[in-house]
Structure formats: C-alpha cells, structure tokens
Image (tube, grey):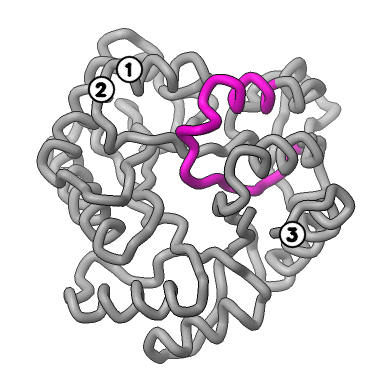
Amino acid sequence: MRLGGHIVRTAGGPETWIAAIVAKGYRAAYCPLGTDASQAERGEYRAAAAEADIIIAEVGAWSNPLSGDRETAEAAYRKIVDSLRLADDVGARCCVNIAGSRGEKWDGPDPRDLTEETFELIVNLCAKILDEVKPREAKFSLEPMPWMYPDSPESYARLLEAVARPGLAVHYDPVNLVNSPSKYFRSGDEIDRFVDLLGPKIVSAHAKDIVLGNSLTTHLDECIPGTGGLDYDRFLTRLNAFDPDLPLMTEHLATEDEYDQAAGFIRSAADRLGIRV
C-alpha cells in the first residue's frame, strides 16, 4: 500500500511539492492543484509525481449535486466534471465526492436520502458525469457514508451495476460505514464484507479511526488512527492483498503533529504485518 496525507508546504512548483511529500515519507499524495490549473501545470505535476514514484490518489470534488437549490446543485455538478477532468490530466487514481444530500446540510442526514427515488437520482447523475467527461484513466468514485448511498457494500455494488460504466469505481472509507455498535465491535467482519464484494474495484481509501462513547444513546466519533476501535490489522491486510499500490490517505486531522501520529501508527502496524506502506 502507499501511505499519504495532507502536507504543509510553502509556495513553489512541483519540485517543492515532491520534496514535502518525500520529507514525510509518503508514497501517495492528494492532488495539490485546483480546477483552474493550466494544462501546462497539470502536465508538470503529473510528470514530477511519476518521476518521484508518487501516486496522486485523488482529486476531491466535495459538493452537493443533490441540493434542492438549483444553483447550488448546478455549481456542484460543474465542480465534479471539472475535478474529474483534472484527475484525468494529472494521472490521479480518482475524483471523489459523496453522493450529496437532499437536506439542508450537504453531508448530513435527510429522510429522503435513503430512498429509491434518491438512488435513481444518484445513478443518473453518475452516468451524466461520466458521459460528459469520458475519462481516459481516472475513475469517478463516491465515498460511502453512514446515512446516504452508498451506505453498504451491497448498495455500492448495486450502484456500480446500475450506472454500468467502466469510469465508476469504488472509494473506501471503512469508518464511514461503522454506524452502529454491532459494526463497531465487529469492524473486521465489516471490512471483510466490503473487500470480498468490491475489492478489485477499490481505487483509493481513507485512513481514519472511530471510537464508541459510553453515554446514551449511541455516540460514534472520528479519531486519530490507533486511538479507536477500527480493526487496522484486517484493514491493512485485506487491502494490501489485492493491490500493494493502493493509496491509503489520512484525513480530517487538525494539526501536522496529528498527521505524523497517524502515519506513525499505520507504519508501525504495517511493519508488524510485513506490509510496505
């Protein structure tokens, strides 16, 4: 596997970016460019990453194409299209977003989100994006979420079948699928379910952790890798078995020190398991 994370870097070109990645010991990276980057810039960063043996894991297109506000939804659609084109140009594995919500909070729960009507909206949206961009290499992917599709390996498999286009692939975040105490205590089994069904389709993964609180009713919170209950041995072993070059990207941490702590834990676990990250 190839560990990566957010980095702090000073202004500069691709050489400065690569130096910052190498200084952290990462072998994968988030795309550092915005969708306004020129074709020349895109080519320079792609070439620099290839020369340094760095995989660009993903371009984030974080937005809400299911918004009930037409202007917001249209802006989100354009952002996704432009981000997928950027991913293709820089040689990233994928462009990733969540499906979005029909409620007020773009990544929050709404009773309409887990309905058949919304599933069909997501299918049509994915098909429309892929038909417009026609990516050559990069995949479009949806990060699973605890309260919107895809919310399980089965719903992800159903989505892939319904969209029926090779440009759609899987982004994996096991923490987002731990949405109950039973899944928390058996997170390794949940990882097995996901990888058994979708393993070869996974193009990038997020590395987080999750902790179950002890106050009523149920409180599940993200935390730094190694400080929660996710079965990291199962996570690393199963993903590495089908793709030793799979990008594993830490995220949602507050400081550079927290990213270093997360990377240290993952490297220690991987070393114990005989896995190169």
| Image location (x, y in percent) of residue 246 | 56, 50
Alpha carbon separation for disc pair 2 and 1: 5 Å
Residue drawn where x is 17% and y is 74% of the image: 39
Residue drawn where x is 73% and y is 47% of the image: 223
Q: Looking at this view, name the residue that lies furthest to the right.
A: 272
Task: Look at label 1 and name its amino acid.
Answer: Glu
Residue at the disc numbered 2: 164
Residue at the disc numbered 1: 161
| Image location (x, y in percent) of residue 162 | 28, 16
Task: Look at label 2 and name its amino acid.
Answer: Ala
Query: Which residue range is magenta in the image?
Result: 190-210
| Image location (x, y in percent) of residue 141 | 37, 39
Instruction: Report whether 103 appears left or right of 55.
Output: left
Describe the element under mark 3 as helix, strand or loop: helix
Describe the element under mark 1 as helix, strand or loop: helix
Task: Look at label 3 and name its amino acid.
Answer: Ala
Alpha carbon separation for disc pair 3 and 1: 35 Å
Q: Is residue 265 above or below residue 196?
A: below
Q: Which label was assigned to residue 262?
A: 3
| Image location (x, y in percent) of residue 163 | 25, 22
Instruction: Report whether 238 appears left or right of 232.
Output: left
Specify which label sits upstream in the sequence, 3 or 1: 1
Residue drawn where x is 32% and y is 34% of the image: 168
